[in-house]
Structure formats: C-alpha cells, structure tokens
Amino acid sequence: MHTSPGAQDPNAASRAQDPNTASRRTVLALFAALTAVPLLASPQASAAPEPLAAAGLDDPAKKEIAMKLVSSAENSSLDWKAQYKYIEDIDDGRGYTAGIIGFCSGTGDMLDLVELYAARKPGNVLAKYLPALRAVDGTDSHQGLDPNFPRDWRKAAQDTAFQQAQNDERDRVYFDPAVRRAKADGLRALGQFAYYDAIVMHGDGGDSASFGSIRRRALSRAKSPAQGGDETAYLDAFLDARVWAMKQEEAHSDTSRVDTAQRVFLRKGNLDLQPPLDWKVYGDSYHIG
C-alpha cells in the first residue's frame, strides 16, 4: 500500500507492537551489521601474497649477465658472443685458450669441444686436428697444431654449428654443474655466479686450487645457507678461498675479478645479482644497466 508523505498509516501502531515484526527487524539489523564487516578480516584475505623468488643464474636474463661478467674478465669486453673466434696462448701452461669460456688445448675441454663438433658436422675445418689435440692434452705443447690451428679456429667460429657446440659444452662442463651445486648450497644468483666463475678458471679437478678444493676450504670456515649459515658470511669465505687459489698461479695472480667485481656486489648486499651493476676488472670499468 502506498501512502502520501503526510498521511497516517492506520496499521502502524499495531505493527510496532507485534513481537514478530520486532524480532524480524532485529535479525535484519544484525545481518546488515555482519555483512558490513570487511572481507579482509578473514585470514585468507588478510595474508600478504608470497613474494616471488628471485631468478637464479639459469634464468635467461641472469645467464646473459653471467656471460658478460666472465667476458669482462676473460676478454676485457662485454660482447661475449664476439669471443667464439677468440684464440691465443696466454702462457698459463694450458696451451691454447679459446672460445667463449676459455677452452684449453692442454686441459681436455677443447678436445671434448672439437670432438662434439666433429660428431655433429663430420669433416669440419677443425676435425683434422683431433689427433694433435689428443696428443697435447695435459701439456702446453702446440705440436701438430701450429701454424694453422688459430686461423682454422677463427674460420670454424663463423659456423653456427660450432657456436652451438661451444654453448653446449660451456653448459655441460661449467655452467650447469656450478649452478646446480650453488643451489644445493642454498646460494642465490651472486653465489651461483661465484661458483661458475671459479669453475671456469680453476676447473673441477683434484688439485688444491680446483673449484672443489676452494669450496671445501670455504665450508671449513663458514656454514653454507643450506647448513643454516649466513649467506654473506659464507660467500666471503668462498671468495677468500678463491683469491688464495688464484694467487697460486702467476697467470691468475691479479684478483680484481673478485676484489673489484664479485666482492663489490657482495658488499652492496646484491645477492640476487640485480642490475644496475658496476664493477672493474684489471682497472677497466664496466656497467650493466
């Protein structure tokens, strides 16, 4: 029934005295109050979303950073893809050093690389050097490689199949094992890179300056995060052990790739290796924005 604004409702008084009407109003009022409570009061709604885990070194963008960092130390350039053709003897007792990661004729990894390339592309320009590479493995000799091996290496480096072989051997021998071990030790991207850079330079042999020995020395001085230790303290111990190992070889006695690069990131607390990054190697300055 519709009433005009000023009209009296003849049934208003009886409805006001009706207990059923009063209880209905009470229930409706309570219901309105309850539904007005913000949904955020529930535990599920009030819980803050879990932060996304920072990317590891195997994330493509972080891997690109890792390659640039290594190239700055190995080749004084951030253009790591220009290093497929790189080759020279740096007088470190390992024969020829070449390619994007410093494959060496005296340490077996160059032999493995050229064997992989030959398997994928028989008769390539480097295949004829396989007997010589097998013979000089473990030495710094160029026997059977000179005078044309450097020229032919640079020629092979124009072949995308050889470039891919370099990428794959880098990952199999160095990158993947380093990242896997670092993650097992509870390390984030910076620690993963510290492992990678160490295994690139020192290899994973059994001598006192190898990556495995560096890691064991660090673990004797600090617990890894996986053992409940502090990540920064452990990385400090690892970099100390790395510097010691570098100083055992004259060719690696310049420790700036640790002192003015990795240690800089660590001091800034940049454990996720997030750009922008600024560092120095051998006195040269580099930047990744």
Image (spheres, rainbow, N blue to C red):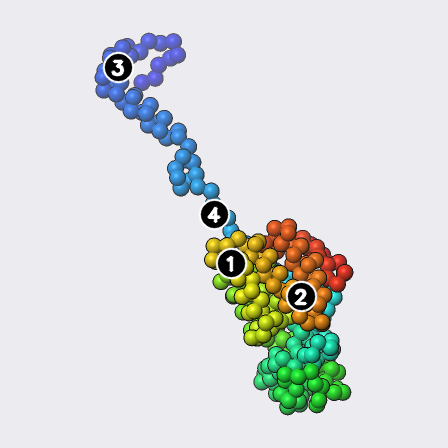
Q: Foreground: 221 or 69? A: 221
* Residue designated by label 4: 50
Identify the element where label 1 is drawn: loop
Q: Is residue 93 shown left or right of residue 24?
A: right
Hey, what amino acid is under mark 2? Val
Instruction: Quarter of the image for the C terminus: give it.
Output: bottom right
Identify the element where label 3 is drawn: helix
Spatial CA span between label 4 and label 3:
55 Å
- Callout in the foreground (2, 4): 2
Hey, what amino acid is under mark 3? Arg
* Residue designated by label 1: 224
Hey, what amino acid is under mark 1? Ser
Spatial CA span between label 1 and label 4:
24 Å
Q: Is residue 195 shown left or right of residue 83?
A: left
- The disc placed on residue 15 is 3
Q: Residue at x 47, y 47 (%)?
A: 50
Identify the element where label 2 is drawn: helix
Q: Residue at x 68, y 79 (%)?
A: 94
Residue 11 figure quarter? top left
Badge 1 or badge 4: first in the primary sequence: 4
Spatial CA span between label 1 and label 3:
77 Å
* Structural crowding at the residue carrying mark 2, measured as other residues with C-alpha within 10 Å and reported as few (<14), some (14–19) or many (≥20): many
- The disc placed on residue 53 is none
Badge 2 or badge 3: first in the primary sequence: 3
Q: Residue furthest left?
A: 19
Asked whether residue 127 appears in the rendered view, the answer is no
* Residue designated by label 2: 70
Q: Foreground: 23 or 110? A: 110
